[in-house]
Image: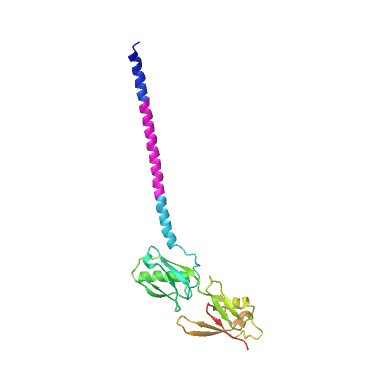
Amino acid sequence: MNASKVWRPIAIATIALTLLTACASGASSTDSSSYNGGNSSNNSGSGSSNGQNGNNASGGDSATDPAYQLVRGDAIYVNVYNESDLSMDQRIDSRGIIRLPYLGEVSVSGQTVREAEKNLEKLLVEKKLLRKPMVNISVREYASHEVSVIGAVNGAGIFHMPKEKANIEILDLVTSMGGFRVTAKSDEVKVTRTLDSGEEKTYTVDVEAMIKGKSSALRTFLIYPGDQIGRAHV
């Protein structure tokens, strides 16, 4: 048999097998690249999502209780979502005021965190600074929450309120300090408070009527940091 006739089909078969292998390898490579590309696209999308979440985190809900009532001396951070030039740390001054760019002086003392946030959002719209602002306030440092009790109760002295609380019921304060002294006039407890204007005001509270649940009694009387419960004994 002619050797060339035998070699020719073998060579053709070898070439064909080589071509098939190369095609299969190329297809595999293409599939792999396409799959990886899909993952890359997904990863990119994930990165974008993370970035968005990061922005949301900066403008999201504060760790501060939204029902917390802000008081003079609180150090707060005002965050206006996506507006770094409007976001800053502020300490509420003795008049209950903070100062913000473009807004000037804004009173926040006595407002809850949520109320202050909504008021600032309203001001930003009214001043035509932002169309749909989102404001978040968090308390960086709570003011000294002390109440001076001079002589009405057994544990007279300084009462330290929990820092996360802006006020305390007068009955709760009296109870936590050991109750009234025997000589105390619990029906005429004097509470002196310094207002945001700097003026001092004294309230007379019939705590005895509150204790007994008399219909004429106040349902509640809140004590705030800086208040002084004066001598109410005979």
Region of the chain picked out in magenta, as a range: 17-44
The answer to whether residue 60 is magenta is no
Q: Main secondary structure of the magenta part?
A: helix
Pick out the residue farthest to the top. Answer: 1
| Residue 228 placement (x, y as % from top left) | 55, 82
* In the depicted structure, whether residue 116 falls above or below residue 28: below
Residue at horizontal 36 percent and vertical 69 percent from the top: 125
**Foreground of the two, 36 or 132:** 36
Q: Quadrant of the C terminus?
A: bottom right
| Residue farthest to the right, as pictured | 182
Image location (x, y in percent) of residue 214: 61, 81
Number of dots carrying numbers = 0
Residue 132 visible: no
Question: Residue at 43% across / 62% down in the picture?
Answer: 58
Check if residue 21 falls in the magenta segment.
Answer: yes
Asked whether 124 or 160 is in front, the reply is 160
- Is 91 on the left or on the right of 220, as rendered? left
Q: Quadrant of the N terminus?
A: top left
Image position of 82 with respect to 162: above or below: above
| 150 up-or-down from 163: above or below | below
From the top left corner, tell me how far across and down residue 169 is, in percent. 57, 76
Q: In the shown orientation, is residue 73 left or right of residue 48?
A: right
Q: Position of residue 225 (x, y in %)?
A: 53, 77
Rendered image quadrant of residue 135: bottom left
Tell me: 188 left or right of 45. right
Q: Tell me, what colour scheme is on the image?
A: rainbow
Residue 58 visible in rendering: yes
- What residue do we see at 38% from left, 29% from top? 21
42 up-or-down from 121: above or below: above
